[in-house]
């Protein structure tokens, strides 16, 4: 990976890692936005935060609220199928030597969000949640790199842990610049997830299903950034 990056920089081409930080900001903001959208507007179910769904599934099952348990189980299943689909897409892109195929994940998510934006308010929630869970899972399983580090655009816990750990290492090692840089970037990604959640909640309360247009805008900028920098995911 480092060798490929150095060659591309010497040839004047954009580095494969050049766009991963702004891309991570956009995708994480969209991730938080969509979780807020489904929680606020689709009956208190998370599209991306499967930890929350697992906890609520366990609580509802333990208290005998089986219909609620099923509502939280279904997005988990959709997310799992999304991971399977992402693996297939990455394998296809690798086998054909055409990494641009990975961008299908962003296009698919864009299409789904645009369709949801035009659905009436009374449209059933479960198909919307399942569709978003699936496409968000595909996208987040393909775009997994923040510079040279792994991250996740649809959950905040791991990113927040990395930001904190690297900050401690950087300070304890007499301001190690590499660790502090990692802390700054993972902290920014965590904040972008938070900002996205806030924006998603406000937009959903104001315009309902049409709020997904906001996430679609974020993903459009992410796709344009991929095309400009040569970032293709599947790292």
Image (cartoon, rainbow, N blue to C red):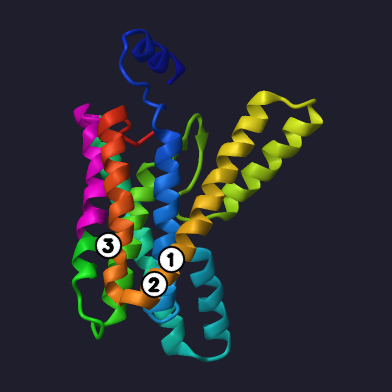
Quarter of the rendering containing residue 156: bottom right
Left or right: 10, with 119 as reference point: right
* Sequence order check, earlier mark of 1 and 3: 1
Of the pair 141 and 106, the residue shown nearer to us:
106
Q: Is residue 48 visible to the viewer in this orientation of the structure?
A: no
**Residue sitting at x 18%, y 71%:** 118
Give me the C-alpha separation between circle 1 and circle 2: 5 Å
Quarter of the rendering containing residue 206: bottom left
Task: Give the quadrant of the N terminus.
Answer: top left
Name the residue that disc number 3 marks: 213
Give me the C-alpha separation between circle 1 and circle 3: 14 Å
Left or right: 216, with 55 as reference point: left
Mark 3 is surrounded, within 10 Å at the Cα level, by few (under 14), some (14 to 19) or many (20 or more) other residues, namely some
What secondary structure is found at the residue carrying circle 3?
helix
Numbered tag placed on residue 225 in the rendering: none
**Residue sitting at x 43%, y 66%:** 35
Left or right: 32, with 216 as reference point: right
What secondary structure is found at the residue carrying circle 1?
helix
Name the residue that disc number 1 marks: 35
Query: What is the x, y in percent for residue 134?
Result: 31, 61
Outermost residue on the front side: it is 206
Outermost residue on the top side: it is 10
Give above or below for 192 relative to 95: below
Kindly indicate whether the residue at mark 2 contacts the one at mark 1 (C-beta within 8 angstroms). yes
Query: What is the x, y in percent for residue 74?
Result: 37, 73
Q: The magenta stretch spans which residues?
A: 95-111
Kindly indicate whether the residue at mark 3 contacts the one at mark 1 (C-beta within 8 angstroms). no
Name the residue that disc number 2 marks: 38
Left or right: 93, with 1 as reference point: left
**Residue sitting at x 58%, y 50%:** 158
């Amino acid at each position: 990976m480092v060798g490929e990056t150095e060659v591309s920089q010497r040839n004047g081409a954009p580095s494969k890692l050049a766009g991963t930080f702004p891309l991570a900001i956009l995708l994480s903001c969209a991730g938080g936005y969509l979780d807020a959208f489904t929680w606020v507007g689709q009956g208190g179910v998370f599209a991306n935060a499967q930890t929350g769904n697992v906890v609520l599934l366990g609580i509802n099952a333990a208290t005998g609220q089986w219909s609620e348990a099923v509502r939280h189980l279904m997005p988990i299943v959709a997310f799992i199928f999304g991971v399977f689909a992402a693996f297939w897409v990455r394998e296809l892109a690798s086998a054909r030597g055409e990494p641009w195929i990975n961008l299908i994940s962003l296009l698919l998510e864009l299409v789904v969000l645009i369709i949801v934006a035009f659905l009436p308010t009374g449209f059933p929630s479960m198909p919307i949640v399942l569709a978003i869970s699936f496409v968000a899972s595909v996208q987040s399983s393909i775009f997994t790199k923040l510079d040279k580090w792994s991250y996740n655009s649809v959950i905040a816990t791991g990113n927040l842990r990395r930001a904190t750990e690297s900050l401690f290492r950087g300070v304890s090692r007499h301001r190690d610049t590499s660790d502090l840089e990692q802390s700054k970037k993972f902290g920014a990604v965590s904040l972008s997830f938070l900002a996205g959640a806030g924006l998603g909640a406000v937009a959903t309360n104001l315009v309902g299903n049409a709020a997904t247009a906001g996430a679609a805008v974020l993903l459009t900028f992410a796709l344009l950034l991929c095309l400009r920098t040569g970032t293709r995911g599947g790292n």
